[in-house]
Image (tube, rainbow, N blue to C red):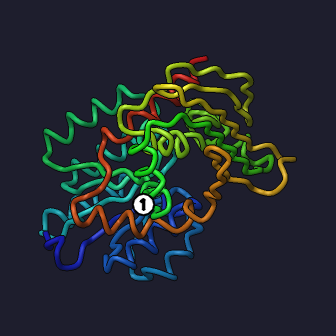
Amino acid sequence: MESKRMKPRFALIGAAGYIAPRHMKAIKDVGGELVAAVDPHDSVGVIDSYFPECEFFTEIELFDRHLEKLRRNDKGVDYISICSPNYLHDAHCRLALRLGADAICEKPLVLNTRNIDALKEIEDETGRQINCILQLRHDPSLKELREKILCSHNEYWVEIIYSTPRGKWYDYSWKGDVRKSGGVATNIGVHLFDLIGWLFGSGSSFSDLNIMDMKERYVWGRFRMQGESIGRISFSLRIDGGEPKRIMTINNTEYNLSNQFMNLHTESYKNILKGEGFRLGDTRFAINLCEEIRGR
């Protein structure tokens, strides 16, 4: 296998999804090579903009066979990036590790916390590792805010409003199936729950979470963080929701998170290649919270 310090080789699962182009761009930005991609949908012309020579498959079995053949000929991939539907992340992480590659997985890593422990066992068995995309943690302004919060003993009022209207198609896709996506609190909430847990420290916990209203496309509730900090969350995918809004307010200071969601995948990949990616344990706080909400 080629050294990761020379030209890292990548494969991609879920090439037709809306998030995949960010991964392709990141791979190109870090000087990597995308050698194979798979998606059951074959409308993936976007690959041409980044890696026109990339091998493409519509069946995961053929993709698996191709990568295994490369591995046995000392041309295996170093990383497999996973942009598949949420409920398949677990299985595709396992596939990556069994093929001798490290995984780079989009959020949510898994739908249930018990799967984090199971993936850790596979990491230990294979000697490979799973890296999690938690791109908001790379934003410089949010890093500065985190340092300020962790160095103070103040009480905080936190409000997060995330509204991204989705059309009727959403209800008929895997995203609208709570068994496959985890529901709206997981689909979009996992990003914000991770941000809250990270900003307030790894030991943060929700000592009181009160979900006031929860529908297929809407969740809102109140919470109390460890200590006296309190807050409110509102996630919406309603068709009539107006313009997208990704706003976090802390003690009357407003932070627009829209740009941070779009532009930080390259930074994530740079850190992963340096061995500084976010690992399984970093995902537990947000996934546990999503799981708790889903059980209510």
Give the residue at the far front of this rendering: 153
Q: Is residue 33 left or right of residue 212?
A: left
State which quarter of the image contains the N terminus. bottom left
> What percent of the width, then of the height, locates residue 227?
47, 25
> What percent of the width, then of the height, locates residue 169?
75, 48
180 is higher (above) or lower (below) than 39? above
- Which structural element holds mark 1? helix
* Residue at the spot 42% in from the left edge and 80% down from the top edge: 51
Asked whether residue 253 appears in the rendered view, the answer is yes
* Residue at the spot 42% in from the left edge and 72% down from the top edge: 26
Asked whether residue 59 appears in the rendered view, the answer is no
* Residue at the spot 26% in from the left edge and 71% down from the top edge: 9
Q: Is residue 120 left or right of residue 172?
A: left
44 is higher (above) or lower (below) than 250? below
> What percent of the width, then of the height, locates residue 50?
46, 80
30 is higher (above) or lower (below) than 104? below
57 is higher (above) or lower (below) than 222? below
Inspect the image, locate mark 1, and give the three-letter code of the amino acid beneath it: His
For label 1, the residue is 138
* Residue at the spot 46% in from the left edge and 26% down from the top edge: 226
> What percent of the width, then of the height, locates residue 122?
21, 38
Q: Is residue 163 left or right of residue 1?
A: right
Residue count near mark 1 (Cα–Cα under 10 Å), binned few <14, some 14–19, many ≥20: some
Q: Is residue 146 left or right of residue 72?
A: right
